Image (tube, helix red, strand yellow):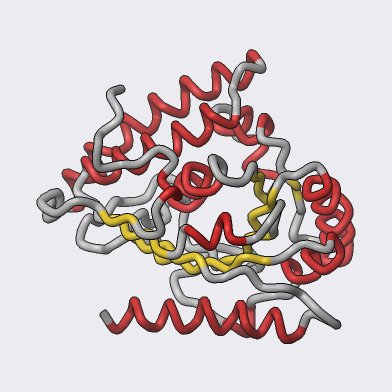
């Protein structure tokens, strides 16, 4: 595809990105119908390359940005703020944020990976999907069961440190599942513990991505609602000191305050 002039490559070369005006206002039915055939085609192609061992980080970030463009073409508006904070910390970091939908799994690689090589902490089912699974396996993610918190902690600390020592940043969602509201009480300290253990900074991010809703039968394939703005915001890097309590509180406060602002807009 021809790269559109309104979308920098990499996108994080600027601090803020907003979808150009004039693309909004379509119905949920039309947007959903417009978006998913393109997404399925994209993932099928990516899966074939991943199975052959030819799916690179560049392919991953490019496909992520193509997904962003397809969401815009389907009527969605996307606003991304604070991207200069991605590069503000030297070396790899732990990205810690709330989790709302499939949208962030697709869009975060294109925002982050061109600046800092990155992988995710994910649940086992994402590795087992017949089409999307090979793509995720090619990114060498950290897999946790979420059934045994103690074992998950060991896995994240050991494998996360190995990725960070190798120069690969880690995206971690401390909530146990996708939720439409931010609940600080259910936001665990796993990300801060990983950053402290590996001796790296944490970069908080807040998101509101319920324009890509969870599906009734297949969670990843829900309605696309173009009336809802897709928001991402990255905060300044946080240095973890002591037991990490202050850092965790700063991260939770950043996400909570940002989420409240979006709800009030």
- Report the quarter where the C terminus lies: bottom left
* 191, 125: nearer the viewer: 191
- Report the quarter where the N terminus lies: top left
Within the image, what quadrant is residue 246 found in? bottom right
Vertical position of residue 205 compared to residue 51: above or below? below
Q: Position of residue 29 (x, y in %)?
A: 19, 47
For this orientation, the residue located farthest to the top is 52
Q: Position of residue 201 (x, y in %)?
A: 72, 65
Q: Look at 42% across and 55% down and name the residue there.
A: 214
Q: Look at 64% across and 13% down and name the residue there.
A: 52
Q: Look at 10% across and 51% down and name the residue there.
A: 22
Q: Is residue 224 left or right of residue 110?
A: left
Is any part of residue 121 visible from this angle?
no
Is any part of residue 152 visible from this angle?
yes
Q: Position of residue 251 (x, y in %)?
A: 61, 77
* 28, 7: nearer the viewer: 7
Picture mark count: 0
Q: Look at 35% across and 41% down and name the residue there.
A: 8
Q: Position of residue 230 (x, y in %)?
A: 34, 60
Q: Is residue 111 left or right of residue 128?
A: left
* 178, 263: nearer the viewer: 263
* 177, 228: nearer the viewer: 228
């Amino acid at each position: 595809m021809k790269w559109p002039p309104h979308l920098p490559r990499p996108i994080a070369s600027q601090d803020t990105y907003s979808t150009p005006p004039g693309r909004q206002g379509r119905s949920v039915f039309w947007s959903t119908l417009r978006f998913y055939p393109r997404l399925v085609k994209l993932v099928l192609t990516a899966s074939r390359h991943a199975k052959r061992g030819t799916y690179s980080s560049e392919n991953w970030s490019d496909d992520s940005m193509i997904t962003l463009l397809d969401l815009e073409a389907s009527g969605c508006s996307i606003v991304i703020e604070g991207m200069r904070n991605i590069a503000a910390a030297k070396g790899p970091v732990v990205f810690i944020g709330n989790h709302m939908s499939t949208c962030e799994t697709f869009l975060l690689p294109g925002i982050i990976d061109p600046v800092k090589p990155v992988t995710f902490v994910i649940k086992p089912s994402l590795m087992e999907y017949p089409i999307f699974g090979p793509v995720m396996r090619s990114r060498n993610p950290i897999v946790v069961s979420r059934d045994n918190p103690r074992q998950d902690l060991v896995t994240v600390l050991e494998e996360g440190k190995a990725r960070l020592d190798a120069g690969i940043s880690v995206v971690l969602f401390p909530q146990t599942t996708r939720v439409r509201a931010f609940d600080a009480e259910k936001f665990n300290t796993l990300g801060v513990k990983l950053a402290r253990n590996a001796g790296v900074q944490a970069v908080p991010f807040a998101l509101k991505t319920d324009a890509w809703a969870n599906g009734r039968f297949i969670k990843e394939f829900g309605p696309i609602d173009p009336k809802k703005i897709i928001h991402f915001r990255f905060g300044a890097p946080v240095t973890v000191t002591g037991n990490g309590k202050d850092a965790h509180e700063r991260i939770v406060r950043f996400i909570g305050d940002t989420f409240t602002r979006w709800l009030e807009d």
